[in-house]
Amino acid sequence: MTPQKKATLISSCVAAILTLMKLVIGIASGSVAVLASAVDSVLDMFVSIFNYFAISNSEKPADKTFNYGRGKIEALASVIEGTIITISGLYLLYQAVDKAINGHISQYLDISIYVMIASLIITISLVTYLNYVAKKTNSMVIKADALHYKTDVFSNVAVLVSLVLVTFTGYELIDVFVGGGIALYIIYSSYELIHDGILVLLDRAVDEELVCKIEEIIKENDKVNAYHLLKTREAGHQTFVEVHLVFDCIITLMDAHRASDWIEDKIEKLDTKRNWIINIHMDPYDDFKMNDTNH
């Protein structure tokens, strides 16, 4: 089992445990803040399960139907996850407004505090683990999961503070404001997931810094006279690079191939965590300039 799959399975199990704990206490206590956190954990569980299947499919090799593989499933999962988070945030905001209008009273606050402390400890441990896997694998889905649970850490802290303040002051509006604040933060945090996922689906180029390093490697080889049509994109754990290299017309095919292999090897060493898919076109003349001249 890959680290990505293992991470999604662990996060799914953790989310299931947190969901059960918070949902029981949230319904029993009537606390909007606890219920908000419980609903978020329910979504965490379903999203983590969805991510497991997304990663399983994205890791399948290219075939006749999907010539470039299924790497974009991770980006699609990120967009779906962000959308679900946004919907949950809107629902929690509605719950906070409803309590403010109807004035529900929170109960079982002592037990709720203990549950939120346990939830906070578990969530921090999970975020630490997911961040480790995300750095190791460079998986967009795991990064999204880590960010998602990181927002849970902040919401758990806010809920805990809210419960303590309501216990000592008796002001139920504190619960309303904290629940509403968590809802707004959840909606805000989903923007990055949706934004980054859409950019990958639109074949955004890799970071400019990495592109510059690729260009430096190409220029470093004295066999290459020029280059053009350098294109890059990412899909899941794969990074695609395509470029046209211009060689002297009298160079042997063997020498041109060796130079291309040297460049390809150098590019792959820029980041060994990436699965590089490099496609180099060897041109005997700069057809890009010739096409411009003809036009």
Image: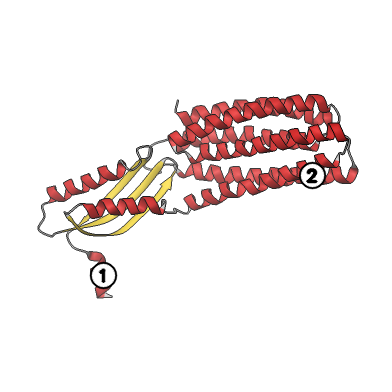
| Residue at the spot 57% in from the left edge and 40% down from the top edge | 147
| Residue corresponding to mark 2 | 177
> In which image quadrant can residue 166 be found?
top right
Q: What residue type is labelled 1?
A: Asn
Give the image quarter of residue 118: top right
In this orientation, which residue lies closer to the viewer: 70 or 285?
285
Callout 2 crowding tier (Cα within 10 Å): few <14, some 14–19, many ≥20: some
Q: Position of residue 70 (x, y in %)?
A: 44, 42
Query: Which color scheme did the rendering employ for the protein?
Result: secondary structure
Question: Left or right: where does residue 55 sit relative to residue 291?
Answer: right
The reply to whether dot 2 and dot 1 touch (C-beta < 8 Å) is no
x, y percentage for residue 144? Answer: 55, 40
**Is 10 left, or right, of 286 in this rendering?**
right
Which residue occupies 75% across, 24% down?
Answer: 114
Residue 258 location, x and y as percent? 17, 46
Place of residue 178 in the rendered image (x, y in percent of width and height, measured from the top left): 77, 41
Alpha carbon separation for disc pair 2 and 1: 63 Å
Residue 68 in view of the camera = no
The image's mark for residue 291 is 1
Q: Which of 99 and 159 is in front in this view?
A: 159
The N terminus sits in image quarter? top left
Three-letter amino acid code at the position of disc 2: Phe
Element under label 1? helix
Asked if residue 14 is positioned above or below residue 269 in the image, the reply reads: above
Camera-near label (2 vs 1) is: 2
Residue 173 horizontal side relative to residue 5, left or right: right
Residue at x 74% of width, y 33% of height: 160
